[in-house]
C-alpha cells in the first residue's frame, strides 16, 4: 500500500537516486559504526546506509511507517517524537558491541528542524558527527560568517560547539512531493575541546543580543549586562551580527 506524505509531520520523501548516492557518500558509513537515522520515512537513505553498516537505529514518529520499518531485521525502530528521545540512553542501550558514540543522520522535518538541532546540543558528548538534510536557508544561517545577513542566533549557538560545512545542494525535484524550497546537506562535527561555558546563560545572552537585529546591542545586550552587574569591557556600539562567536563565548565566560 502506498504511503501518502502527511503534512502535519512535514513529510517530503527523497526519491532521486543520484542525490541519495551523493548523500550516502558524504556520510561515508562503515561496518560496525553506531548510527541513528532521524525520520527514515520510506527508507530511501535507510536502505543504502544499512547495507554499509550492517545495522541501524531509526527514529520514526509516523506509526504506519514505523510498522513497515520493523519488518527489516537489521533495523531497531524507536517510534517517538525525536524531541522526546534521550540520545544518551540510546547510545548505551542500542546494538550491543557497537561503539557508544553515535553518528546521527536524517532528513529533518522543516517545520521543527531548529528545535531538533537545539535538542541535540544536549547530547553532543555522545555524538561523533551529524549529517542532516535541511532547508537551504536554515543551513545558510547555520554556517554563516559574522557580519553577513545570514549570521544569527542559530549561527552562534551551533558554531561554538560544532565545526560545520554545507556539503551538498538538493533541489526540490529530488523529493516526492517536492517542497517549495531548496534543500541542502550539512555536516556537523563536535569540537573535541569546546570552551567551557554555562550553556543556559549563553543561550539567554545570545537570544537577547539578536532580539532586535537592526539596533545596536547597547539597547538590548547592554541593558541585560547591566542587570547582571557586568563590570568588564565589551563594545556595545555594534549590531549582534557583527560580533564573532569567539567574542560571545569570551563575554559569557567573564560573566
Image: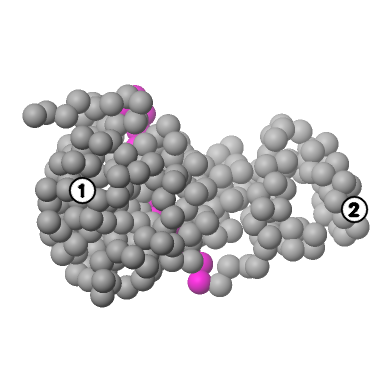
Q: Nearer the viewer, residue 209 or 228?
A: 228
Quarter of the picture holding the N terminus? top left
Q: Is residue 121 magenta?
A: no
What residue is shown with label 2?
A: 229
Toward the left, the furthest residue is 1
User: Which residue lies at the image location 32% right of the left edge and 39% below the top edge?
Assistant: 61
Classify 10 Å Cα crowding around label 1: few (below 14), some (14-19), many (20 and above): many
Residue 83 position (above or below residue 31): above
Whether residue 175 appears in this view of the structure is: yes
Nearest the eye: 77 or 5? 77
Residue 185 placed where, x, y %?
Answer: 35, 47
- The answer to which of 150 and 125 lies nearer the viewer is 125
Q: Which mark is residue 45?
A: 1
User: Residue 213's spot in the image, x, y percent?
Assistant: 69, 34
Relative height, residue 75 to residue 67 (above, below) = below
Instruction: Point out the image quarter for the C terminus.
Output: bottom right
Residue 163 makes an appearance in the image:
no
229 displayed left or right of 20 = right
Q: Residue at x 58, y 68 (%)?
A: 194
Residue displayed at 29% across by 31% down: 11
Q: Which residues are magenta?
A: 179-192
For residue 230, side relative to residue 195 (left or right): right
Closer to the chain start, of discs 1 and 2, is 1
Give SS at disc 1: loop
Identify the element where label 2 is drawn. loop
User: Where is residue 95 shown, x and y percent of the image?
Assistant: 25, 66
Amino acid at each position: 500500500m502506498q504511503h501518502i506524505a502527511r503534512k502535519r509531520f512535514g513529510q517530503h520523501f527523497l526519491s532521486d537516486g543520484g542525490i541519495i548516492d551523493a548523500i550516502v557518500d558524504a556520510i561515508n558509513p562503515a561496518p560496525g559504526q553506531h548510527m541513528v537515522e532521524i525520520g527514515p520515512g520510506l527508507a530511501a537513505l535507510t536502505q543504502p546506509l544499512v547495507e554499509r553498516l550492517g545495522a541501524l537505529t531509526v527514529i520514526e514518529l509516523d506509526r504506519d511507517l514505523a510498522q513497515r520499518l520493523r519488518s527489516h531485521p537489521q533495523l531497531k525502530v524507536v517510534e517517538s517524537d525525536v524531541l522526546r528521545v534521550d540520545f544518551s540512553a540510546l547510545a548505551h542501550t542500542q546494538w550491543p558491541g557497537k561503539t557508544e558514540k553515535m553518528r546521527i543522520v536524517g532528513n529533518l522535518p522543516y517545520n521543527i528542524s531548529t528545535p531538533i538541532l537545539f535538542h541535540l546540543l544536549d547530547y553532543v558528548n555522545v555524538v561523533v558527527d551529524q549529517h542532516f538534510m535541511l532547508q537551504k536557508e536554515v543551513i545558510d544561517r547555520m554556517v554563516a560568517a559574522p557580519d553577513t545577513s545570514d549570521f544569527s542566533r542559530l549561527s552562534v549557538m551551533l558554531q561554538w560547539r560544532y565545526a560545520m560545512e554545507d556539503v551538498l545542494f538538493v533541489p526540490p525535484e529530488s523529493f516526492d512531493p517536492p517542497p517549495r524550497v531548496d534543500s541542502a546537506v550539512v555536516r556537523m562535527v563536535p569540537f573535541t575541546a569546546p570552551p567551557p561555558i554555562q550553556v543556559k546563560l549563553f543561550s539567554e545572552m545570545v537570544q537577547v543580543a539578536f532580539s532586535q537585529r537592526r539596533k545596536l546591542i547597547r539597547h538590548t545586550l547592554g541593558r541585560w549586562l547591566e542587570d547582571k552587574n557586568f563590570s568588564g569591557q565589551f563594545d556595545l556600539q555594534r549590531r549582534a551580527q557583527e560580533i564573532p562567536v569567539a567574542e560571545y563565548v569570551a563575554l559569557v565566560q567573564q560573566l
